Image (cartoon, coloured by chain):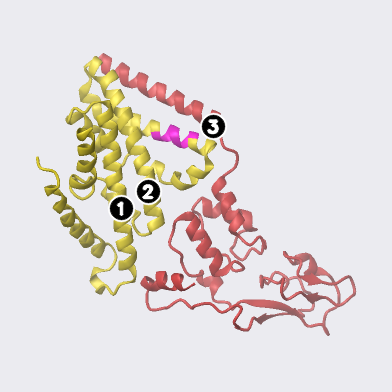
Chain colours: A red, B yellow
Amino acid sequence: MIIAIVTIAALATLFGLLLGYAAVRFHVEGDPISDQIDKLLPQTQCGQCGHPGCRPYANAIANGEDDINRCAPGGEATIIALADLLGRDPVPMDDDIGEKLPSVALIIEKECIGCTLCIQACPVDAILGAAKQMHTVIESECTGCELCLAPCPVECIVMIPIEEGIGNWIWPYPDNDHRDLSLSREAL
Amino acid sequence: MTEFALILVSTILVNNFVLSKFLGLCPFMGVSRKLETATGMGLATTFVLTLSSICSYLANEYLLIPLGLEYLRTITFILVIAVVVQFTEMVMHKTSPMLYRVLGIFLPLITTNCAVLGVALLNVQEQHNFIQSALYGFGAAAGFSLVLVLFAAIRERIAVADVPKYFEGNAIALITAGLMSMAFMGFSGLVSG
């Protein structure tokens, strides 16, 4: 009886010490998983996912606090890349985020007063202009995050949906049931 | 040499741990949806099973039997296996990030997998020596990986097949597993005795 208690206690203590030592000795800086997730995100820092930037969203995914389908600028490609990394099944874009068509901002140049507020708000530096000069949006850089809409004092920025063409058309998800997801993934 | 080959064939095909001993069914159903994850899981299990059957053999032979504590076998094995796996995971995390990426997520999952403990206990029951224990563990894991990968491949086909509505998901997976189990019964004629 005594021998049993002593043996198990000694064994457990020994193993505890070993693991404690290993935790200190083999400590790894940072969280590699959230680093890897962060690398896959588009780094537009647009905040459409509800987090204040890409790094916080990556941390939230790594901790299992948020789903992988909330990155609007990344779109389908990001969801599939994240699903591959994390070994999960890809899911369609979140409804709050996904229902908008992909679009770019357009400044109505007649109304622009050149206040530069939208330039400061743009996370990807897609707006060109200077104080008291008319601004314009570089269409190819714009991620459609809509962060420039709110600061504009004269509301001269509108969102224009991107027209579907050969360059950006993708297979649509079938909407009958989830089973066909893997099919459309192969088609991608 | 024949004896070692016999152990391998027996554990991989004839007495397959999943299909004829019904051990390790949770990862078998859980991670068999995708072929890549199934392969990762198979590799991780092979690693852990071989290591843990060696360690638990040593613990049994040099700690429990000399002290006459055979009745504490289960709890000691669980302790030893958990610690060895955790320790290996830490070392691997630091020294080989590449390997950690392949196996990392699965290692803690299988620490207390029933197949892992089952192999350790069966080793004692069948009075294997050191090399036999290691081979038995390795063979069990190879059999597990083989079946897991085959099953994942079948399930990937089933996912796009036209399955009747009430058999979708786990129901058809269990039926498939049953059919595989019956198919593997055919191997019992492979080795006589």
Can residue A123 be found in the magenta stretch?
no
Q: What x and y, as percent, mark residue A38?
A: 60, 54
Please give the chain letter of the residue carrying mark 2.
B
Mark in front: 3 vs 1: 1
Which residue does the numbered mark 3 point to in the structure image?
Answer: A26
Check chain identity for marks 1 and 2: say if they share one: yes
Please give the chain letter of the residue carrying mark 3.
A
Q: What x and y, as percent, mark residue B101?
A: 49, 46
Which residue corresponds to the image point at 71% horizontal and 77% vertical from the top-left? A105
Which residue corresponds to the image point at 66% horizontal and 60% vertical from the top-left? A43
Mark in front: 3 vs 2: 2
Check chain identity for marks 3 and 1: say if they share one: no
Check chain identity for marks 3 and 2: say if they share one: no
Query: For the residue carrying disc 3, how many other residues have a C-alpha within 10 Å: few (<14), some (14-19), or many (20+)?
Result: some
| Relative horizontal placement of residue B40, taking residue A37 as reference (left or right) | left
Which residue does the numbered mark 1 point to in the structure image?
Answer: B148
Specify which label sits upstream in the sequence, 1 or 2.
2
**Magenta segment range?**
B85-91
On residue B41, the disc is: 2
State how far apart marks 3 and 1 are (Cα). Answer: 32 Å
Q: Overall secondary structure of the magenta stretch?
A: helix
Mark 1 belongs to which amino acid? Leu
Callout 2: helix, strand or loop?
helix
Callout 3: helix, strand or loop?
loop
Is the C-beta separation of discs 1 and 2 under 8 Å? Answer: yes
Can residue B88 be found in the magenta stretch?
yes
